[in-house]
Amino acid sequence: MNQTGHYTNLKAVHYPEPRRRGERPPGEIFLVVPFPQPSSRSGHSHPLLNPSPPPSPLRPAPPATPAMAWRLPPLAVLLLLVAAAVSPLSSAVRPVSDAHRSVAAELFAASPDDLETTYEAVRTFKILGVQRDKGLDGKACKLAAHTLSSSSSPAKDLFHAVKIAGVLGCGVDAGVYDDVASRLKAVIKDTNSLLEFYYSVGGLLSLKEQGHSVVLSDADSTFHAIKALSQSDGRWRYDTNSAESSTFAAGIALEALAGVVSLSDAEVDPSMIGVVKNDIVKLFGTIKSYDDGTFYFDEKYVDGSEYKGPITTSASVVRGVTSFANVVSGKLNIPGEKILGLAKFFLGIGLPGSAKDCFNQIESLSLLENNRIFVPLILSLPSKVLSLTSKDQLKVEVTTVFGSAAPPLRVNLVQVLGSDSKVITTDSKELQFDLDNNVHYLDITPLKIDVGKYSLVFEITLQDSEHETVYTTGGRNTEAVVVTGLIKVDKAEIGISENDAGSAESVEKLDLLKDTKVSLSANHLQKLRLSFQLSTPLGRTFKPHQVFLKLKHESKVEHLFVVPGSARQFKIVLDFLGLVEKFYYLSGTYDLELSVGDASMENSFLRALGQLDLDLPEAPEKAPRPPAQAVDPLAKFRPQKEIEHIFRVPEKRPPQEVSLAFTGLTLLPFIGFLIGLMRLGVNLKNFPSLPGPAAFASLFHAGIGAVLLLYVLFWVKLDLFTTLKYLSFLVVFLVFVGHRTLSHLSNTAAKQKTA
């Protein structure tokens, strides 16, 4: 910001994150004004959900110009301010809700044709309790039955087909299942591929879960064959020929080993079980984390075809670890905070943007909801905006990832930190529990906190010590809140001064919370001064994020200035002598408008202060021209200015008697025509006597009468084009019937001459 208060280098930020539902498109450039930038829907600003390799480094963006600042209307700035401050809070971790069900129904709306997507759809709907169309279920069962009965189906397709039949309860003949089981066992004997082991063992386990008798007789050898692909860091290889290890492969390997243990007819070697438990500990040693306690697994990047992405990789590990923990004795040595961190990671996704991510998110959360390691308990705030004016209570919910009630516990507020991480209070306050609404609450008035942003540190303690081996709370949880209130505006003054000493020629008091307007006048040798003070409900000096003064010329040219603030007041001085070029030497009337806004300020305002009649010198020859004003493309569709037109005075018409006399004269030719017919002795002696010719003759005369009637209608009613249209049809009709009539008369006359 330069000395005049204009922005000269607003930062432009380039976001390379992949787009998810509700996020900005990748590569979008937007202006950043000095308030906190909005985060993604998930609450993480990391490039985590990218299904492709990690993005390239940030590319620098060109600096913005002052015109960019001018194009930000104060009202838009206030709206952006609120959105920027609230969006990080609205993206907080919350349990699975109806919004996830709606998104799942939308993502899986189309009936998939492949087995894998079909299984992911039916499995997701079953977990969420979403009702599917019966016709779609029937189509899925038909697809599964066809795959199971086909002798050419690979292990992967058999795996998904058996899973679909298990979820939907499809009726499959026992003989078909026997054949599938024998084929899957044959694959296990002949393969050294981890994926083949995974699909074959998983298919057999699904058959067993559906009540079919399945036993893996060579379980020990299968267990050793899968374990042989493990690496020292807890990762797994896909086959014996693979040089690189994979975290995703570790997940499917653990799930396959769990299936082998379940299918075995005897106890698997306990020493091998202990080795795998140790591998799991090593695997969790590679887990990555954020500062907010979120944990996730990321695949080691090898190439574009093998990179899975954090969601898919983390989901694979969760499936493998929970499956293995459910079939072995004892408890896995995994810290509870890492299980809780994985739950926060999947909940932090928010509403996923793809069907694959939706399936991985929902299934992983369902496995974490019921597992033998630790059941994560999620602390969340129904509202992260607390009002001092309405005396809002701080409310906290502690539930499982699907919103189920937690066991008896205590929630204490142990620390309050300011936006600068400064400790506000360390007095521990226990929250009261509302049993009816399953919420913990606390009155914030005794905390003596002012408006602003705070980080609240909570500590959760389980009341029953036995639950500590079942549930994990993560110890301390930090949540960000915004405390709002009414800001007091005092000592607002505006005036015109003559010199730097500040001797005012005219000073007027302002009430910025009411519609008070002033009328000022100044020239280029004078200065405009505006000052006011802001204070919080506790009497402290308040510095909002946005304070703008806008001057708008009658020609629609706008100038936006930032009002700087000191420890005591906000004050701006506009020296018009130094601003004549920025004002393009435009004299005339300027509208004054002040906007003050902050996410913590409940009475943010956009106030019209009045008008300033500014007299500037004439523009020199090479002075800058005002920028062209944007043309509204919808202006041509708006109501236009009414056109006023006076028609000429009608000419004077003759008396009615004269008009009637001339109308009668027009009938004289017709009367003469009738007299002529009588004098000529016109008669009907030659009218045909035979029925056929007589009919054509009658139609011919009727057509002539219709033409005469059409002439009358043209005179009194019809226009020229309508008359010609009807006349064209009558002419064709008259030509036809007239030709027949005249032909008959000609033949009759020829016969009479011959006779």
Image: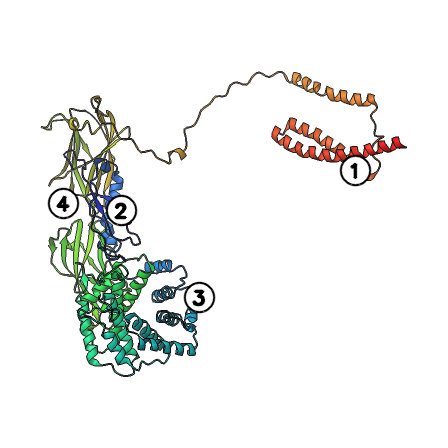
Q: Identify the residue at image location x=16%, y=67%.
A: 285
Q: Nearer the viewer, mark 4 or mark 3?
A: 3
Q: Which residue is mark 3?
A: 139
Query: Gap between marks 4 and 2, in whole Å?
Result: 41 Å
Q: Which residue is mark 1?
A: 695
- Rendered image quadrant of residue 564: top left
Query: Picture coordinates of residue 383 (x, y %)?
Result: 25, 55
**Label 2 secondary element:** loop
Name the element at disc 3.
helix
- Tell me which numbered mark, 1 or 4, is placed earlier along the sequence: 4
Q: Could you tell which of marks 3 and 2 lies nearer the N-terminus? A: 2
In the rendered view, tell whether residue 402 sits above or below residue 689: below
Between the C-alphas of marks 4 and 3, the distance is 69 Å
* Structural distance between the alpha carbons of marks 2 and 1: 85 Å
Residue type beneath disc 2: Glu
Which circle's residue, 4 or 2, is located before the other in the chain? 2
Residue occupying image coordinates x 76% and y 21%: 671
The residue identified by callout 2 is 28
